[in-house]
Amino acid sequence: MLDPISYKKTKDVDEKYAVKTAVIEKELNDFQNTLANVNINQEAKQSVTGYGIVSLPKNCANGQVNATVKGETLTNLVPKNPSETVLTIDNYFVLCNSAYDHLLTRGNINYKPSTKYTLIVEIRKNTLNKDITINYADTPIATPIGTIVSGTKGIFKKAMTTKEDFSTAKYDLWLSKNITGIEGEVECRIAIFEGDYTNREIKYINGTKSTVSAVRVKSESADKKQTSMLYLNAGQPLRSLLNGTKDEVSAGKLTKRNKQYILQESDIEAIVTGDNSNTDLAYTKVFTDNKPWTPEIDKHVNVLNKDQITSGLERQSIENIGKYYTSNNQRIYFVLTKGTTLEQARQQLAGTTLIYQLATPVVTDIQTSGSLFGYPSGTVYVEPVLPVAGLYEATGIKVTNSDFPIATLEKISKIDPNTGIETDIPVSGAVIAGDKLSFTHPSLVAGDIVFFTYFHSVESTVGETTIGYYDSRYTIKDSSNGKFYQWKITSTNGVASVTLVEV
């Protein structure tokens, strides 16, 4: 008979192997269910791109597809979002933070002249008893841009582009007033982005955010009877620059083309005074891993929350204090108030965030799970969902990565350690911990092997997704042996014939 200590050690080892065995069994079962559809050793011949949701064409063959998710870095220009307050609506007006019934006024944002911007309004709470119109105004003309349907939340997420010169016009956002009988509360969040995003999926973010790499790529057939999933997590955001350079993640690989760097006090090397009587300049150390910068407006580097200027006379203007420019000596120069000391400059600029393009992309391996398959006229969704497998403890079960707290649980199942068979557990019974990093469930006990998936709560932009697929016009499945073949028409002395090559 084993003594208590030896027994505990043996039991711990058995439980660890049980978890590992159950997970392997589950993955093998999933793999066996889909292996017959894999097109081995052939690159996809076609591709389709989208944001968040990608529609597959009807000529997409039944078979394995590849997915690439690219990053995007955006900044919400609204400095203090008034939408964090619930707006109470009565018969006459809207009560909110700003004057009168306006939700947002032009005075909050430093618009650039003759520049396109995209506005979105997202409704997160709605107890209205009637429909109400939301307006976007180029004073004095108001333009309705959507309707908030009574009692429905999350329904208004609309983008529009303003093409006029913001320096000469006042722009406001408001809810319609003077409508008899309107009562209830609305919580809306507002974002304004520089650029035109009206033809793609975009959502509210606070401050500057990049695309999260912790995602599930889910493919569904047109009739929703077939589903496959691929989980990707590079453990870091996927960033982009205005020149179109984007980080990307695919099955097994992270390609990092951009680097985020936070300035330290020691990075500010000196002050330049010269004979300019209006401003001084502080410059940084030489950056060595970046793609070389140029003296003019350079889209290889982005200093967050600061405008970029040229290195000419603009640097001598008081109006440009706080802005920056890049130099071909691979330093960044900041325009400062006349008389600023080096110590003051270092204190002011420490903590400034840069994103710049790397001279050489860095490719690293990442851990992925699952397999992705395409279906004719199917749909691919990119979702902030992660999987977790582990042992349930007396205190519950935790997420694997604390950087991705639980927003909502999607699925919980208990795995038989001997067979790998999953038994679904109702999500409704789960109690998520206050820190969102674990949950408990009355149907689970310590020692149970649990697999669950959940939507995480990390705020993110919607990155570009490209799906590579086989063209069914050239790839067919054999009705007898179940194998896939690519057909080609060949000609010999003017006589055509069809050639099949297994793929």
Image (spheres, rainbow, N blue to C red):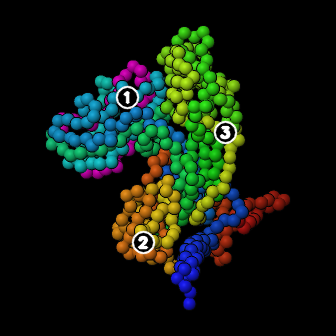
- Residue type at the position of mark 1: Asn
Residue for badge 1: 108
Say if 19 sits above or below 331 in the image: below
Residue 478, quarter of the rendered image:
bottom right
Tag 2: amino acid:
Ala
Cα distance in 3D space between marks 1 and 3: 34 Å
Q: Is residue 163 magenta?
A: yes
Mark 2 residue crowding within 10 angstroms, few (<14) / some (14–19) / many (20+): few
Q: Is residue 123 visible?
A: yes
- Residue 185 belongs to magenta span: no
Q: Image point 64% across, 46% down: which residue?
A: 256
Q: Which residue in the protein does label 3 denote?
A: 358
Boundaries of the magenta span: 151-179
Q: Which amino acid does label 3 sit on?
A: Leu
Q: What element carries label 3?
A: strand
Q: Considering only order in the chain, which callout, 1 or 2, is on the residue closer to the N terminus?
A: 1
Instruction: Identify residue for label 2.
Output: 394
Residue 391, horizontal then vertical, whole percent? 49, 72
Of circles 2 and 1, which is in front? Answer: 2
Mark 1 or mark 3: whose residue is earlier in sequence: 1
Q: How crowded is mark 1: few (under 14 residues within 10 Å), some or many (20 or more)?
A: few
Q: Residue 415 or 218: which is nearer the viewer?
A: 415
Horizontal and vertical percent position of residue 181: 15, 43
- Residue 270 is situated, as x and y percent measured from the top left of the image, at 62, 23
- Residue under the image location 42 percent in, 72 percent down: 394
Q: Is residue 421 left or right of residue 66?
A: left
Relative to 474, is 184 on the left or the right?
A: left
Q: Residue furthest right?
A: 493
SS of the residue under disc 2: loop
The answer to which of 185 and 23 lies nearer the viewer is: 23
